């Protein structure tokens, strides 16, 4: 940016803050250079003075350079000598059922593909073959999963064509310097030289302007020092003793200049952008990052200083200053500012290749067709022609239809056609309603629903509509309610306003019906009336009635449907004059004569089949013989036989028909095709038609077929016929073919293929443009600029014989039917509108038109264009094709991560083995990579006959794509290669060495007036009463005290699945039971004071009594979750491990569990002979113990808390008596607990805060706890909620797994629960106990679902604890409601917090984890430097509290770890305070809310566990974020988990649907992770529900899962390796 002229002192503080933040993002790699410059330019735009002389000099240089020698090279002739007809003689003789579509067959291409694949033989790399469970797909069992060799290569070449030079000025308008630029297109010849010259000139200008280094350095220092805290960079640089001498600073500047200039020329942007980078470095050298500010300083934290950088408190009172700040603060920007697409910042734009071919010819001149001749007896309208033939040539045959065997069934004469059409027109206008209220009026649209096998009925209906002046809309016959594309046909009927359908009686009977016998309402269709048009239902017109046949005008005659690339079906309206002119043009071009015979193999409802076989034929009284698709399937030679028998002069066919006839011709020896003067190939515009035409000619030349009669043509639904080859004179040379380089085509230029014959495309011409038409070639995207002569573009046509609009869609019409081409300068070439044809091609020598593809088959990947048909041809040339059906293959692109990705879907043959399919797929990948230089994103094989079909049997591409994206494709084999084709990922982050120490960060925050990130709960206060002091010191004494002072007060009520109280415990009962357990321990155990005792109980009161029994005996209880009787192999080893690690001397348990521990099943998992003493507490001695133990000090151990973390670590922490009593007191204060209160607890009581609530809190505070074991919810889901309602509970505690169970299981039953009287309005607080980031989505859906039962939306909150401190936050009664903020996920990955607005892209909602407990202090610390961080900065949460754990309980006593986690100090700030490290990342943010003390409330936001984060591409990811995206990817994903394996990301997804959906998940999971997290998934594992291990707190055990995956113990449904 040329901001040398900017006076930084005059720039508002907010802008300076933004600039500092941008610098930081750039240095962190959080934003690309381009994104940085764009944003910086936008910020500085309004403050720039007149541009300096340096910039002017630069733009002058640029203009001189760009106006170098222009390219005046003549265009190269792009059609070499014509090769002889290709020698593919018949191909395979036997016609297999699937070899339907061989238009893509070319022996030359097949050889090329084989040659390309042969090259890769040496480069083979073993690729893991996907593993599939045997049961998953019966279709093809996996014999063995040994990975076959597979070639895998990451491409590093990029080609970005400079195709749209007119777009460049737009790009510059965005930035401030746009108005000073005059962009001039430089030709490719002068590009390299010009850019070098520009660079040399740039260096010269810089050298000149840098002659006085002192001046520049002074400027830099002055501008920095005037700009307050944001640019404290300079002052801090100086204060750190890093003063640079002028020369060293100059060296830095020149170094940066040199570096910038050594970058290869960027042809996609002009020089000023590069210049600006250099200039910005001059003003702020790269090392001048704001030192006094910590990493990740966010803009919100910089608002608290005054304009000149003085901290807030130094001048006026805080309140006034706050008011001033509020007034100064800019208004919130409009929403659009928040939601800009940030692709420029994220995506790595590959540098364009200087060798990219560019068009070099002159601008194309529009091509004119021959003039349309005027013939005296041409009728004024098509209906008039029918009337004339119907009267004068009534016996002349108009149409012959065939039966299924190919024999003539029925001939319709012109007389019959006229009379029946007349009857139908009369009936439509006069007999469908009353005289005053007719159903149809002229101009109304009517659907024509007739099968292909009944062309006669269709002809009558079509001409009947023309005579009645209603507009026919021919559509396909719907076969079922869920037809492929049914919805889109509904859209067509809706946009055309169709409410009536004409059909035949037979067709009506075949339509799907409802049980009542009515015609089914088809998906997406408007309500339709059906009219049968069989002759017996028509009325003969009265003698005085005559149809109105006006001279052809611009009113719509008929509507032809057209499907777009996206699948939308639109109606192209053809006017009466266009209809007539088109018939005249075809008559002239094809030289039709009256009375000729024509064989039509195409669909007569649309396209060439309609234009030649129904309209032009009637105009010229031609006899048409229609061969429907069904006949062709049964007898492929039928059309050739018809030509032979009827001596037909013209045949209208597709390549498919040529191929089928050629395959079946050996059955017919005596066919003679010498009568044909014109064989019109309707899809001759497909480049792959050449081989079919050649092969057909090869076979039938001996049967009289003349080479010159083959006439390929090009057509489009919008422009109708575009060009057609006229039949040549006998013996004249055939037109030349173009052999083009596919590489050139992908860049949109025409280059004769010279170097690599493997990637050549042979194209035949489609003749000359139609009579009376004018044709241009324009750029396919952007403004319709005329192409150069050697450039591929879209063909546009101006003709009276084309479509006029998309009916009912004026917006889309304008872009297609009213295109005015512009020249290189952007000026229109005239005022006549052209129509886009959707065909891509060029004009060759002699004005011959060549078509190389269609817009709808165009796939633009990384700026290069590929044609879907070319890719199909390459895939089908990979031998052997015994794996898939040739004609059933779909190629399309899906947009993933800012680029199109190519997907190929094919139908697999039932007999293909897994191994063969995989082998074929990997060879296709190699072939496409070699020949087209493009990576395939996904290749999927689906079972036979499952792809959606079009009515004529082709594959419905858009519906296939829709199924792929929605996960409804159900492939049986899939291969994803994102590593090869995703080349625009942002560069991996390289962490910058932090030059700023913790002291500097703290000082910087203080100077900037930012508060440090710390927060504290209320004061605990002092206990006054003598009686309470004892109680507060030891929990065992508290129970004794309660048993004496209030013996009958019920402390605990245990409920069963029916909601009945199965067990209660008063203070006295609990005390007495604990005493008995103490006696049992003393009698049977032979234990010493301080021994560890494992308590193995189901959730209940026995567990509580056993705990206090141990305290009374002076033993250390260790609560352990009992093993699951049905799953001992998985659960018993954990029990054994805790017993071993805790060195337990004894196990207290129940009789059933004791039996399990000693059972044979247990022996299979662990050594049962080495259990410590097991005491069952079901039969207890009656004696009281002689005395109860009293610990000598409160610092002694009370109990051990063991838990398996989500990373698979078993950690036991020591809880002292004083910590226990302080914790209970803290909870009592926070939740206002006292004897008359009732709380309900539904969570696992074995560790953490859950154990404290279940066993300790009631004894301390005296409130009554209603205990609901979570396992009872599996028997009766509503148990917990009905308890809350029945007992009118105000406070309840639960776990995430309980909340999830209720949300999923009861969400749909709220009405029935309400009817049964459930009411949750009594619930004041429902706290989820967890050691993780709050699951906001779950808590919100729980609140919303049960709102109808009276649950307050403010009730649900979360708690937070960790191993070092079991309870840090707990939403109490007095604090403010938990607040929610939205954080930018990109910044989180860079270990920073950037707060954004709700709904911003890439935003993550975070909920506060509850109010901090009394007596707890929290500080946010940089985990590397151990220095404190500022407000709203991400760091590790450190905690200081009297109830922190004393340390880890370990066998080897890892003292270093102990000290590091439990007694650690800050490196700067408060050196004497001891802190405990939680191991969780989070931040503290001061909110606007007031706490209970009246101060502003500090909210703690937990982001995630540090040990659990994944380091990928230099960024930090939290697994839960990726898992949230994955779970959204498909409706059948029940749960997901991610972990890394080597450096690959592995996603495990639980499939809740049927196993045939397993492979649908693979691409969707890959897409969503790439889109939202910019990561490529390495392995996708699909498993059954319940496979992902979840601990009792509802947390995923990702490391256990990883171990099981690596040990091959998951029994997955499918494992896909995205290699």
Image (tube, grey):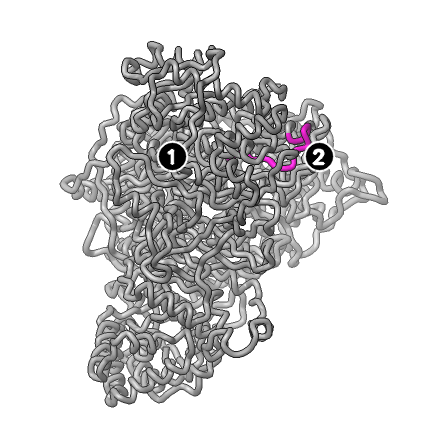
CA neighbours of label 2 inside 10 A, class few (<14), some (14 to 19), many (20+) = some
Mark 1: which secondary structure? strand
Asked whether, in this view, residue 606 is left or right of residue 1483, the answer is: right
* Residue 1061 in view, yes or no: yes
Q: Which of 586 and 220 is in front in this view?
A: 220
* Residue 102 in view, yes or no: no
- Is 778 placed above or below 1328 here? below
Mark 2: which secondary structure? strand
Q: Give the range drawn in magenta.
A: 1284-1295
- Is 1330 placed above or below 1087 here? below
Tell me which residue sits at (31%, 66%) in the image: 359
Q: Circle 2 is placed at which residue position?
A: 531
Q: Residue furthest left?
A: 122
Q: Which mark is residue 1197?
A: 1
Query: In x, y percent, where is residue 1209?
Result: 33, 35
Q: Which of marks 2 and 1 is nearer the N terminus?
A: 2
CA neighbours of label 1 inside 10 A, class few (<14), some (14 to 19), many (20+) = many
CA–CA distance between discs 2 and 1? 90 Å
Q: Do the residues labelled 2 and 1 touch (CB within 8 Å)?
A: no
Task: Decide whether residue 79 is among the magenta residues.
Answer: no
Tell me which residue sits at (36%, 48%) in the image: 1477
Which of the 4 image quadrants contains residue 1194? Answer: top left
- Quadrant containing the N terminus in the rendered view: bottom left
Tell me which residue sits at (71%, 26%) in the image: 1316
Q: Which of 1550 and 274 is in front in this view?
A: 1550
- Quadrant containing the C terminus in the rendered view: top left
Tell me which residue sits at (47%, 34%) in the image: 1034
Q: Which of 957 and 1361 is in front in this view?
A: 1361
């Amino acid at each position: 940016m040329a901001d040398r002229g900017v006076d930084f002192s005059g720039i508002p503080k907010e802008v300076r803050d933004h600039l500092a933040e941008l610098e930081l993002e750039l240095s962190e790699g959080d934003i690309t250079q381009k994104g940085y410059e764009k944003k910086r330019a936008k910020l500085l735009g309004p403050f720039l003075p007149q541009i300096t002389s340096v910039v002017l000099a630069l733009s002058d240089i640029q203009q001189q350079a760009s106006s170098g020698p222009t390219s005046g090279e003549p265009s190269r002739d792009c059609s070499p000598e014509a090769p002889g007809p290709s020698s593919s003689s018949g191909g395979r003789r036997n016609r297999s059922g699937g070899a339907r579509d061989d238009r893509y067959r070319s022996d030359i291409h097949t050889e090329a593909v084989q040659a390309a694949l042969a090259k890769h033989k040496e480069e083979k790399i073993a690729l893991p073959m996907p593993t599939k469970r045997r049961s998953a797909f019966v279709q093809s069992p996996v014999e063995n999963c040994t990975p076959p060799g597979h070639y895998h290569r990451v491409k590093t070449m990029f080609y970005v064509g400079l195709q749209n030079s007119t777009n460049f000025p737009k790009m510059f308008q965005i930035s401030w310097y746009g108005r000073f630029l005059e962009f001039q297109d430089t030709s490719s010849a002068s590009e390299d030289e010009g850019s070098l010259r520009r660079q040399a000139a740039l260096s010269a200008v810089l050298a000149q302007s840098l002659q006085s280094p002192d001046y520049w350095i002074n400027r830099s220092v002055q501008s920095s020092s005037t700009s307050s805290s944001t640019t404290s960079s300079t002052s801090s640089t100086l204060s750190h003793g890093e003063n640079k001498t002028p020369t060293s600073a100059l060296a830095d500047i020149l170094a940066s200049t040199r570096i910038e200039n050594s970058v290869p020329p960027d042809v996609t942007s002009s020089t000023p952008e590069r210049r600006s980078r250099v200039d910005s470095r001059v003003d702020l050298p790269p090392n001048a990052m704001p030192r006094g500010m910590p990493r990740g300083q966010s803009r919100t934290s910089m608002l608290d200083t005054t304009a000149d950088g003085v901290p807030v408190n130094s001048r006026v009172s805080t309140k006034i200053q706050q008011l001033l700040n509020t007034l100064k603060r800019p208004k919130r920007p409009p929403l659009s500012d928040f939601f800009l697409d940030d692709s420029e910042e994220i995506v790595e734009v590959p540098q364009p290749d200087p060798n990219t071919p560019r068009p070099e010819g002159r601008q194309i001149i529009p091509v004119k067709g021959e003039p349309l001749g005027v013939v005296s007896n041409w009728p004024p309208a098509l209906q008039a022609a029918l009337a004339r033939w119907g009267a004068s040539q009534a016996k002349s045959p108009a149409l012959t239809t065939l039966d299924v065997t190919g024999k003539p069934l029925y001939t319709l004469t012109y007389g019959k056609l006229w009379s029946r059409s007349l009857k139908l027109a009369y009936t439509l206008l006069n007999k469908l309603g009353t005289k005053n209220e007719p159903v149809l009026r002229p101009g109304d649209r009517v659907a024509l629903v007739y099968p292909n096998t009944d062309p006669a009925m269709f002809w009558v209906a079509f001409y009947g509509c023309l005579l009645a002046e209603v507009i026919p809309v021919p559509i396909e016959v719907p076969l079922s309610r869920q037809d492929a594309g049914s919805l889109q046909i509904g859209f067509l009927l809706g946009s055309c306003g169709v409410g009536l359908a004409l059909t035949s009686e037979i067709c009506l009977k075949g339509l799907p019906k409802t049980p009542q016998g009515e015609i089914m309402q088809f998906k997406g269709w408007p309500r339709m009336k059906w009219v049968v048009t069989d002759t017996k239902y028509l009325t003969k017109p009265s003698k005085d009635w005559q149809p109105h046949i006006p001279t052809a005008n611009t009113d719509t005659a008929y509507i032809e449907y057209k499907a777009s690339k996206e699948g939308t079906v639109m109606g192209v309206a053809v006017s009466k004059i266009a209809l007539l002119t088109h018939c005249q043009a075809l008559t002239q071009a094809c030289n039709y004569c009256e009375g000729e015979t024509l064989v039509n193999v195409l669909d007569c409802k649309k396209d060439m089949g309609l234009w030649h076989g129904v309209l032009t034929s009637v105009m010229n009284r031609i006899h048409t013989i229609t061969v429907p698709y069904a006949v062709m399937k049964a007898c492929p030679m039928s059309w050739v036989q018809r030509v032979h028998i009827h001596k037909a002069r013209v045949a209208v066919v597709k390549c498919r028909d040529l191929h089928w006839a050629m395959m079946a011709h050996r059955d017919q020896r005596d066919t003679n095709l010498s009568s044909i003067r014109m064989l019109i190939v309707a899809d001759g515009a497909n480049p792959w038609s050449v081989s079919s035409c050649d092969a057909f000619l090869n076979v039938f030349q001996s049967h009289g077929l003349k080479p010159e009669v083959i006439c390929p043509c090009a057509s489009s639904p919008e422009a109708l016929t575009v060009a057609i080859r006229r039949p040549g004179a006998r013996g004249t040379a055939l037109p030349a073919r173009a052999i083009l380089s596919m590489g050139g085509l992908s860049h949109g230029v025409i280059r004769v293929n010279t170097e690599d014959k493997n990637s050549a495309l042979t194209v035949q011409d489609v003749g000359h443009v139609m009579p009376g038409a004018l044709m241009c070639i324009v750029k396919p995207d952007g403004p319709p600029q005329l192409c150069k002569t050697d450039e591929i573009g879209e063909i546009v046509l101006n003709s009276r014989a084309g479509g006029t609009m998309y009916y009912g869609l004026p917006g889309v019409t304008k872009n297609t039917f009213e295109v005015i081409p512009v020249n290189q300068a952007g000026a229109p070439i005239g005022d006549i509108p052209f129509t886009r044809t959707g065909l891509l091609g060029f004009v060759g020598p002699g004005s011959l038109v060549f078509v190389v593809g269609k817009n709808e088959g165009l796939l633009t990947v990384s700026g290069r264009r590929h044609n879907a048909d070319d890719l199909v041809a390459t895939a089908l040339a990979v031998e052997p094709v015994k794996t898939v059906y040739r004609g059933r293959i779909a190629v399309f692109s899906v947009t993933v991560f800012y680029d199109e990705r190519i997907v190929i879907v094919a139908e697999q043959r039932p007999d293909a083995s897994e191994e063969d399919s995989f082998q074929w797929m990997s060879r296709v990948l190699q072939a496409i990579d070699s020949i087209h230089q493009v990576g395939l994103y996904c290749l999927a094989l689906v079972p036979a006959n499952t792809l959606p079909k079009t009515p004529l049997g082709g594959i419905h591409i858009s519906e296939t794509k829709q199924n792929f994206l929605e996960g409804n494709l159900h492939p049986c084999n899939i291969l994803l290669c994102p590593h090869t084709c995703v080349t625009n990922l942002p560069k991996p982050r390289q962490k910058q060495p932090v030059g700023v120490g913790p002291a500097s960060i703290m000082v910087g925050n203080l100077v900037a007036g930012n508060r440090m990130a710390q927060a504290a709960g209320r004061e605990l206060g002092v206990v006054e009463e003598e009686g309470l002091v004892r109680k507060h010191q030891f929990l065992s004494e508290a129970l004794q005290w309660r048993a004496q002072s209030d013996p009958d007060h019920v402390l605990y009520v245990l409920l069963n699945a029916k909601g009945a109280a199965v067990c209660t415990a008063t203070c006295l009962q609990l005390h007495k039971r604990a005493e008995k357990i103490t006696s049992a321990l003393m009698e049977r155990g032979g234990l010493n004071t301080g021994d560890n005792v494992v308590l193995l109980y189901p959730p209940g009161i026995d567990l509580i009594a056993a705990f206090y029994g141990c305290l009374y005996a002076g033993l250390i209880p260790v609560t352990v979750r009992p093993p699951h009787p049905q799953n001992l192999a998985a659960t018993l080893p954990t029990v054994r491990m805790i017993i071993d690690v805790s060195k337990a001397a004894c196990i207290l348990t129940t009789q059933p569990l004791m039996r399990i521990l000693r059972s044979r099943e247990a022996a299979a998992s662990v050594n049962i002979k080495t259990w410590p003493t097991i005491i069952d507490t079901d039969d207890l001695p009656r004696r009281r113990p002689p005395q109860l133990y009293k610990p000598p000090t409160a610092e002694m151990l009370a109990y051990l808390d063991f838990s398996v973390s989500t990373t698979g670590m078993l950690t036991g922490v020591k809880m002292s008596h004083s910590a226990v009593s302080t914790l209970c007191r803290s909870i009592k204060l926070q939740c206002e607990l006292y004897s008359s209160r009732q709380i309900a607890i539904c969570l696992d009581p074995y560790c953490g805060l859950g154990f404290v609530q279940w066993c300790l809190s009631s004894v301390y505070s005296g409130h009554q706890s209603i205990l609901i074991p979570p396992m009872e919810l599996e028997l009766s889901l509503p148990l917990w909620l009905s308890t809350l309602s029945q007992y009118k509970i105000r406070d309840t505690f639960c776990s995430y797994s309980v909340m999830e169970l209720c949300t999923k299981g009861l969400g749909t039953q709220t009405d029935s629960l309400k009817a049964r009287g459930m009411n949750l309005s009594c619930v004041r607080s429902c706290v989820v106990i967890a050691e993780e980031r709050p699951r906001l989505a779950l808590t919100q859906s729980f609140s919303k679902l049960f709102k109808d039962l009276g649950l307050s939306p403010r009730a649900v909150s979360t708690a937070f604890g960790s191993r070092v401190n079991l309870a840090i936050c707990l939403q109490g009664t007095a604090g403010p409601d938990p607040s929610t903020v939205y954080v930018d996920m990109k910044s989180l990955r860079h270990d920073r917090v950037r707060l954004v607005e709700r709904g911003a892209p890439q935003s993550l909602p975070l909920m506060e984890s509850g109010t901090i407990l009394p007596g707890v202090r929290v500080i946010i610390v940089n985990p590397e430097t151990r220095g404190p961080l500022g407000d709203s900065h991400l760091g590790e949460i450190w905690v200081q509290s009297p109830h922190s754990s004393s340390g880890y309980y370990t066998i080897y006593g890892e003292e270093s770890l102990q000290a590091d986690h439990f007694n650690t100090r800050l490196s700067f700030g408060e050196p004497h305070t001891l802190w405990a490290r939680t191991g969780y990342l989070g931040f503290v943010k001061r909110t606007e809310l007031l706490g209970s003390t009246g101060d502003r409330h500090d909210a703690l936001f937990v982001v995630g566990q540090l040990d659990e984060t994944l380091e990928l591409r230099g960024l930090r990811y939290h697994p839960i974020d990726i898992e949230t995206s994955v779970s959204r990817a498909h409706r059948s994903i029940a749960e997901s988990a991610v972990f890394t394996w080597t450096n690959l990301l592995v996603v495990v997804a639980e499939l809740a649907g049927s196993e045939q959906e397993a492979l649908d998940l693979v691409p969707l999971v890959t897409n969503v992770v790439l889109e939202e997290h910019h990561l490529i998934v390495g392995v996708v594992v699909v498993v059954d529900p319940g496979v992902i291990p979840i601990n009792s707190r509802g947390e995923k055990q990702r490391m256990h899962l990883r171990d099981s995956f690596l040990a091959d113990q998951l029994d997955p449904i499918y494992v896909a390796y995205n290699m």
